[in-house]
Image (cartoon, helix red, strand yellow):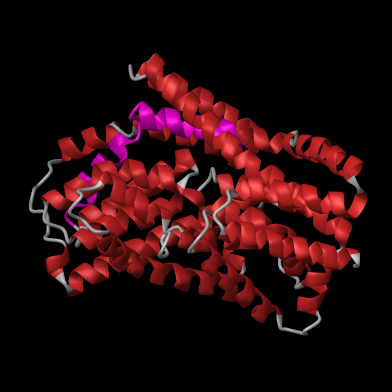
């Protein structure tokens, strides 16, 4: 049996383990270890198990993952983000579907301190959905808005998916952040436009809020956003001005969040404990998957099966647009069953060479991939954001109702995907501008 055949057999074995619901990180590590053993012997396999994870985890960029996570969890548990929705509500409630529009803007603001769509959905779901329900908003619109708004968390920096992608693809994370910022803002605009049009055509979806807020109340609500805005401006002002690197931005963000929470009187030992535990647990689960993916990359390289798969696909002579369409279809399907980090790490060792050979920029593909993975967070049957919202809202609201609500937002997302494929400069303009 040739080395390529061994590699392909183990890839099939890996897919089988995933279908059997074995945790992705452990499946990746086990298959890669056994595959290297079969190719090179047990000494090389054990050596790889010691060297490759250390080499991957020692990448300095990865230190920003726990830092940004800690920043987000401090802001969440210290309730620094609550003022975002309140301010958006008093300023935007007069618009058609104003509370839903406010929820999208609140999610956008929360995204700038979390980098996690799940955390964004959970936090805003507890605040925004009860408020919309109180004003008799259609349950599918209310829940669908917050579930979809949470996906902005992976696009607007800091994005944990983009940080991991930058390590795997050796792409500058700062440029990925700039491209993601543009697509994140386009997503916000598309969601808001769709909500306003829907409510204009069917006012019963969202009865207009008749409550009038004087300017003094609006300004007071705006003032309550000062703590979180200070953190956002401090981190991203320094990041995009070149004052410090993305890695340093994570540390500075974590430090600023603690200082702002302390000054606000909201920092306690309980907040620090909860944020620390959640940061450790989340970072550990991410790194297990990432280490498994790095081992798989080495195994595919040793066996030659990764190159063989890439050459077979490119040898079909498909147009680059057809290749990217096929890649998009794969990720949309995977997103229905796997969480984003697992889906990305499982496939990048094979997909990246194909995309590079087809002539696509690593920066463009990283942002494009992030958008595809976030669509999966809304797609049945395992739309993670949908289940998060289900867990924090009234039990009378069914999963079917939430899935029906997010379907409109998935439609917007697919149009944005088509737009960035047709006009790659949408993503690349800002990264190219900064060189």
Q: How many marks?
A: 0
Q: Can you say whether 254 is above or below 198 in the image?
A: above
Q: Quadrant of residue 400?
A: bottom left
Residue 137 point in image, percent of width and height: 16, 58
Q: Position of residue 378 (x, y in %)?
A: 41, 61
Q: Residue at x 47, y 40 (%)?
A: 114
Whether residue 373 is visible to the viewer of this picture, yes or no, is yes
In which quadrant of the rendered view does residue 21 lie? bottom right
Residue 404 drawn above or below residue 125: below
Quadrant (top left, top right, bottom left, bottom right) of the N terminus: bottom right
Residue in view at x 53 percent, y 59 percent: 373
Place of residue 56 in the rendered image (x, y in percent of width and height, measured from the top left): 76, 40
**What residue lies at 20% left-to-right and 40% top-to-bottom?**
218
Q: Considering depth in this image, is 243 or 299 the residue closer to the camera?
A: 299
Span of residues in magenta: 65-94
Please check the rendered image and state whether residue 79 is part of the magenta-colored stretch, yes or no: yes
Q: Is residue 210 magenta?
A: no
State the residue at coordinates (36%, 47%). Answer: 121
Whether 285 is drawn above or below 259: the answer is: below
Predominant SS of the magenta segment? helix
**Horizontal relation, residue 358 to residue 206: left or right:** right
**Residue 172 visible:** no
Q: Seen in the image, is 419 located left or right of residue 88?
A: right
């Amino acid at each position: 049996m040739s080395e390529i055949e061994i590699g392909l057999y183990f890839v099939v074995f890996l897919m089988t383990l995933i279908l059997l619901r074995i945790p992705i990180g452990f499946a990746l590590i086990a298959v890669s270890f056994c595959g290297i053993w079969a190719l090179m012997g047990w000494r090389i396999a054990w050596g790889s198990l010691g060297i490759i994870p250390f080499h991957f985890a020692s990448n300095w960029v990865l230190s920003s993952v726990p830092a940004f996570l800690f920043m987000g969890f401090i802001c969440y548990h210290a309730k620094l983000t609550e003022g975002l929705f309140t301010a958006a509500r008093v300023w935007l409630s007069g618009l058609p579907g104003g509370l839903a529009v406010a929820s999208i803007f609140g999610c956008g603001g929360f995204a700038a301190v979390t980098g996690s769509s799940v955390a964004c959905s959970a936090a805003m779901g507890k605040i925004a959905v009860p408020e919309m329900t109180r004003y008799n908003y259609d349950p599918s619109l209310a829940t669908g808005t917050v579930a979809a708004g949470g996906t902005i968390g992976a696009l607007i920096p800091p994005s944990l998916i983009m940080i991991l992608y930058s390590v795997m693809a050796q792409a500058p994370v700062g440029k990925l952040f700039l491209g993601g910022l543009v697509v994140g803002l386009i997503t916000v605009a598309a969601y808001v436009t769709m909500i306003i049009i829907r409510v204009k055509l069917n006012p019963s979806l969202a009865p207009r809020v008749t409550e009038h807020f004087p300017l003094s109340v609006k300004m007071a609500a705006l003032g309550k956003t000062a703590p979180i805005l200070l953190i956002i401006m401090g981190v991203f002002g320094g990041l995009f001005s070149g004052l410090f690197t993305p890695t340093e931005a994570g540390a500075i963000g974590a430090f600023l969040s603690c200082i702002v929470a302390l000054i606000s009187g909201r920092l306690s030992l309980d907040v620090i404990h909860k944020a620390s535990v959640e940061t450790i647990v989340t970072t550990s689960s991410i790194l297990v998957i990432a280490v498994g993916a790095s081992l798989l990359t080495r195994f595919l390289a040793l066996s030659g099966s990764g190159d063989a798969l890439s050459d077979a696909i490119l040898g079909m002579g498909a147009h680059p647009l057809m290749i990217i369409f096929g890649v998009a279809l794969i990720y949309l399907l995977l997103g229905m069953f796997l969480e984003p980090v697992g889906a990305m790490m499982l496939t990048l060792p094979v997909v990246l060479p194909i995309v590079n050979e087809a002539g696509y920029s690593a920066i463009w593909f990283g942002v494009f991939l992030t958008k595809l993975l976030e669509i999966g967070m809304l797609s049945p049957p395992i739309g993670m954001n949908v289940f998060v919202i289900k867990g924090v809202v009234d039990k009378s609201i069914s999963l079917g109702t939430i899935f029906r609500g997010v379907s409109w937002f998935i439609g917007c997302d697919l149009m944005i995907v088509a737009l960035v494929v047709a006009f790659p400069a949408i993503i690349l303009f800002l990264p190219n501008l900064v060189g």
